[in-house]
Image: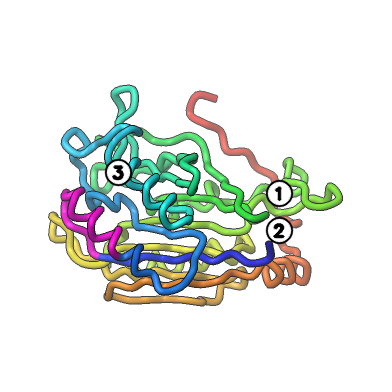
Amino acid sequence: MSTLTITTLQTNLHWEDKAANLRMLEEKINNIPAKTEIVVLPEMFSTGFSMQPEKLAETMDGETVQWMKRIAAAKKIILTGSIIIEEKEKYFNRLIWMLPNGQFGIYDKRHRFAYAGEDAHFTAGTKRLIASVKGWKINLLVCYDLRFPVWARQTSPSNSLSKGEGGIASPEYDILIYVANWPERRIHAWKTLLQARAIENQCYVVGVNRVGSDGNNILYSGESMVIDPMGEALYHKKEMEDIFTVTLDKNHLDTVREKFPFWKDADDFQVLNDDE
């Protein structure tokens, strides 16, 4: 219960080629050298960051979701990453949190990257997804969400914070996971903001980015990271493909929060949906 093992998969992607990406990713997952509990893939892992959802979108009964179910069951892991989904005549950049038993959670990317036209093609999500694994709470977000700290912010104690053992208030989550296609030209922001999110929320942060060039000749340098609640990097890999497995320690997290209980002094706030 006090540890959680996560594998990050930093990889190049075949542009808009689902079959090639799924074959490649399955091979990499099968070759993970260590026992793991969660495998994290990049944003839009089956296509690359494409603005052609009309051509590439699937339903929740489609090939990629079925692939995730099969891989999660066969490897006895939780598998997560985002893909392009069509639902009710709308398109979503949807993160899927697939459990080994075939059950899943979803998170639709809240902040669409208007600079690349994502807002013109995709519908924004309105709800966060905080998953629970072995007593750990995990907040799952996508790429551009990283630039908006309020969306990731821990809720303050006086604003319905979650209750731990004995009914004592505690932060609402323990790990932030960001899946991304974050370009090399703005990679300084990626690294800086990942560390900032860990420090301000007193949590572990896992950021998984891709490498290589996409169909728009945009370069990605990876720089996937795992960061502890003090903002220290436990892992950082630049430019090359890499598979990394890390075991996170809940006792270390609890010690940091107890020794430096900054989260208790946070400001009250509410995040309202567009229709509220």
Q: Nearer the viewer, residue 197 or 70?
A: 70
> Alpha-carbon neighbours of circle 1 within 10 Å: few (<14), some, or many (≥20)?
many
Callout 1–callout 2 Cβ contact below 8 Å:
yes
Q: Residue 201: x percent and y percent?
A: 61, 59
Looking at the rendering, in which quadrant would you find the N terminus?
Answer: bottom right
Q: On the picture, is 197 further left or further right than 72?
A: right
Q: Residue at x 43, y 60 (%)?
A: 39
The residue that label 2 is drawn on is 263
Among numbered discs 1 and 2, the one appearing first in the sequence: 1
Q: For the residue labelled by badge 3, is the local secondary structure a helix, a strand or a loop? A: helix
Q: Main secondary structure of the magenta part?
A: helix
CA gap between label 1 and label 2 equals 7 Å
Among numbered discs 1 and 3, the one appearing first in the sequence: 3
The residue that label 3 is drawn on is 64
Tell me the kind of residue under disc 1.
Ser
* Magenta stretch in the rendered image: 12-27
